[in-house]
Amino acid sequence: MFAIIQAAGWPIWFLLLASVIAVALIIERLFALRRTKIVPPGLLESVIVDYRKQGVTPELLSRLINHSSLGRVFAAGLRNVKSSREVMKESIEEAGRGVSHELERFLTTLGTIASISPLMGLFGTVVGMIEIFGSQSPTGANPQQLAHGISVALYNTGFGLIIAIPSMIFYRHFRAQVDSLVIDMEQQAVKLVEVVHGQRSH
């Protein structure tokens, strides 16, 4: 591995740094965006049961806030349960925007790495081409410098693509996952508003 890094020249260090950051972000988001953690099954039903038993209590709100992202959205709505349906929906939407922003955390960075990795690889290719042209002299080409220039050009291009392809795949996957989670939370929050205001039985 170290021999490859040596053959690829100094531009590869930028790509190695980008690859480490990309792997760390992918692992972090895989854990953070688990559906059972963001939108736990059965939470809406348990909130409705608790609300009908004892109304909105500080204990219920505290438990929801610490429970999950969906719990925070529910808590925002239940704080305004005595207000009109519109006010309750507005408070839920505000909380939803905050939760959505949290879910999208680090995705911009991952998308940026996916976009710039091929360009960083291209930069390494240009450095390699400069070395190739530098190996030419009036007495002929320097074979060692020529070989090193070709190595720099090819390794950097290949490594840039190796980083970019999985990064883009995971970026697209996470974006779709966040959209799906947000829609799920919106639907459950609307059900809660309708149950609380007597427009639905469950």
Image (cartoon, rainbow, N blue to C red):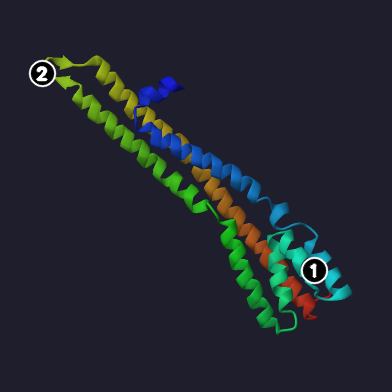
The residue drawn where x is 60% and y is 42% is: 27
For the C terminus, give its image quadrant.
bottom right
Where residue 169 appears, as percent x and y from the top left, is 53, 44
- Dot label at residue 60: 1
The residue drawn where x is 50% and y is 41% is: 21
Nearest to the observer: residue 110 or residue 57: 57
Sort mark 2 into few (<14), some (14-19) or many (20+) by Cα contacts within 10 Å: few
95 on left or right of 120: right
Task: Give the number of the mark in front: 2 or 1.
Answer: 1
50 on left or right of 85: right
Q: Does residue 28 lie above or below 15 as drawn?
A: below
Q: Does residue 70 lie above or below 78 as drawn?
A: above
Sort mark 1 into few (<14), some (14-19) or many (20+) by Cα contacts within 10 Å: some
Nearest to the observer: residue 125 or residue 50: 50
Where residue 51 appears, as percent x and y from the top left, is 83, 73
Quadrant of res 30: top right
At mark 2, the secondary structure is loop
Picture mark count: 2
At mark 1, the secondary structure is helix
Where residue 127 appears, as percent x and y from the top left, is 28, 32
139 on left or right of 148: left
Q: Does residue 149 lie above or below 183 as drawn?
A: above
Quadrant of res 45: bottom right
Q: How far is the residue under mark 2 from the one under mark 1?
A: 83 Å
**Amino acid beneath label 1:** Leu
- Dot label at residue 139: none
Q: Does residue 160 lie above or below 177 as drawn?
A: above
**Amino acid beneath label 2:** Pro
- Dot label at residue 138: 2
